[in-house]
Image (cartoon, helix red, strand yellow):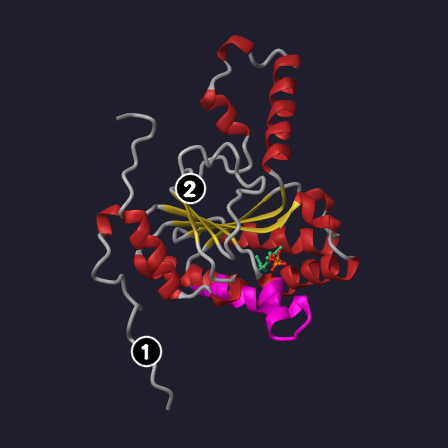
Amino acid sequence: MTIKPVILETLPPDLDKQRLPQHVAVIMDGNGRWAKQRGMPRIMGHQRGVDSLKNLLRCCDDWGISALTAYAFSTENWGRPLEEVEFLMTLFERVLRRELKEMMAENVRIRFVGNLTSLPRSLQDEIARSMEDTKNNTGIRFTVATNYGGRQEIVHVCQAIAREVQGGKLDPETIDEGVVEKYLYTEGLSHPDLLIRTSGELRISNFLLWQMAYAEIYVTSTLWPDFDRQAFHLALRDYQQRQRRFGKV
Ligand code: FPP
């Protein structure tokens, strides 16, 4: 019998339940370096990265955080070697197929954001199926940014609004932040309160540019495959020491 560590299964007592971020976003960086350090091909890092993501999703759920958004593939990531891109596309599809049943059982509502129409057809089908099957789930909202770019999303919003104006359905004078929100890929989802980036890079790399306006940013040198509950605990402790002023005094 394996002894399961009870520690950190529930919210650590030094964290204030009332001051948890409702929505956490993650830039899962450092998979390649993690693999290289171990003399493995980069793809092994991505493979291990899936386990970290799965663990974080479960941890958010266990600790009472209602939304998690992960940056899985950026519009710039097409510039990686072809074998790595193909591996990632196949990995996303395989993981989705494998995990769907469990996500249903755990009441997870999954959603993909990004320019999904240029993904491989079979992946698009799997994405559509996972979103359809989980759409009435009421548990944690899990959003995966795939072929996502913040600037691209803003262009998409501009085009959609321009079409409405052209069709006479929208008066330009009535366009405000609320209207823009309606056309974002993340429509209906609260903005991230906390952005975590692993592997030490101090950038937001075109992730959720509009939505991240007032997110607290936490960067750790831990590489993504090593990001576990302890590391998340530290991020939340740091977050709870911040004073969020939203531009006020
Ligand atoms: C960045 O590390 C990581 C990625 C571009 C891929 C992240 C994807 C996953 C962890 C899989 C998620 C799976 C699903 C189904 C959502 P890097 O390769 O840039 O690392 P490096 O900076 O060390 O090279």
Q: Residues within 10 Å of mark 1 (few under 14, many from 20)?
A: few
On screen, 209 above or below 118?
above
**Is-magenta flag for residue 232?**
no
Mark carried by residue 168: none
Is 153 above or below relative to 221?
above
In depth, the one of 15 and 220 nearer the eye is 220
Image quadrant, ligand 1? bottom right
Where does the N terminus fall, quadrant-wise? Answer: bottom left
On whether ligand 1 comes within 8 Å of the CB at mark 1, the answer is no
Could you tell me what secondary structure mostly forms the magenta stretch? Answer: helix
In the rendered image, residue 156, in percent from the top left (x then y), is placed at 64, 30
| Residue at 63% across, 59% down | 92
Of residue 205 and residue 122, the one placed in the foreground of this image is 205
Which of the 4 quarters of the picture holds residue 89? bottom right
**Residue at image coords 55%, 29%:** 183
Give whichever of 235, 159 is nearer the camera: 235
Q: For the point 51% across and 62% down, which residue is it?
A: 223
Q: Out of 70 and 232, give the one closest to the viewer.
A: 232
- Residue under pointer 1: 5
The amino acid at mark 1 is: Pro
Helix, strand or loop for disc 2: loop
Residue bearing the label numbered 2: 192
Compared to residue 107, the image places residue 165 above or below, namely: above
Amino acid type, callout 2: Pro
Residue 51 in the magenta stretch? The answer is: yes
Q: Which residues are magenta?
A: 32-55
Q: Is residue 84 visible?
A: yes
Dot 2 surroundings within 10 Å: few (below 14), some, or many (20 or more)?
many
Q: Residue 163: where, in percent of width, then height? A: 65, 19
Q: How many marks?
A: 2
